[in-house]
Amino acid sequence: QVQPVESGGGLVPAGGSLRLSCAASGRTFGSYAMAWFRQAPGKEREFVAAITYSGSSQAYADSVKGRFIISRDNAKNTVYLQMNSLKPEDTAAYYCAAGRGGLRVDAVAYYYWGQGTQVTVSS
């Protein structure tokens, strides 16, 4: 079992960058695939990026491909989301999640979720 805790959100102007972190407790962090999802007000939660337990493979939503980078450090039980060239439409609460299903884009594949961190991009 792991418990993700997100940090690093904030207010940033369009074109700026932020790095989100997700620190997960638990000795088995390295055996979980990790993912980032986001949810904007009035919209459904959507997939952003995922990474395998080893970090060898990643997957991205088309809307963030080429701008966001997911990575992990299993020695620190932490997964990161580097967000570059941010747009106002990236504004959302960002959630970190852990699952055992590999590179899955569907939220139901992830068992453990953090409380979220807010990212606001001003135009």
Image (cartoon, helix red, strand yellow):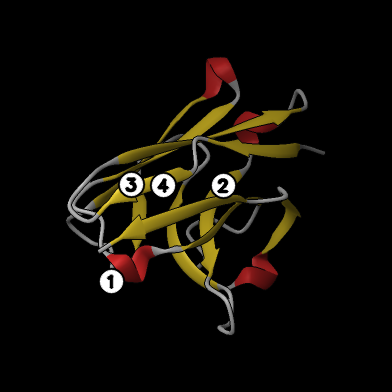
Mark 3: amino acid: Val
Among the two numbered marks 1 and 4 on one chain, the one whose residue lies closer to the N terminus: 4
For the residues labelled 2 and 1, the Cα–Cα distance comes to 21 Å
Q: Quadrant of residue 2?
A: top right
What percent of the width, then of the height, locates residue 68? 28, 51
Q: From the viewer's perspective, is residue 86 above or below residue 82? A: below
Among the two numbered marks 2 and 1 on one chain, the one whose residue lies closer to the N terminus: 2
For the residues labelled 2 and 3, the Cα–Cα distance comes to 28 Å
Q: Which one is in front, 15 or 79?
A: 15
Q: Which one is in front, 15 or 108?
A: 15
Which of pointers 2 and 3 indicates the residue nearer the eye? 3
Dot 3 corresponds to which residue?
12
Q: Are marks 2 and 1 in contact (CB under 8 Å)?
A: no
Among the two numbered marks 4 and 2 on one chain, the one whose residue lies closer to the N terminus: 4
Q: Is residue 61 visible?
A: no
Describe the element under mark 1 as helix, strand or loop: loop
Q: Are marks 2 and 3 in contact (CB under 8 Å)?
A: no
Dot 4 corresponds to which residue?
11
Dot 1 corresponds to which residue?
63
Mark 2: amino acid: Ala
For the residues labelled 3 and 4, the Cα–Cα distance comes to 4 Å
Mark 1: amino acid: Ser
Q: Are marks 3 and 4 in contact (CB under 8 Å)?
A: yes
Label at residue 25:
none
Residue closest to the far front: 123
Label at residue 33:
2
Q: Is residue 109 visible?
A: yes
Residue closest to the far top: 75
Among the two numbered marks 2 and 3 on one chain, the one whose residue lies closer to the N terminus: 3
Describe the element under mark 2 as helix, strand or loop: strand
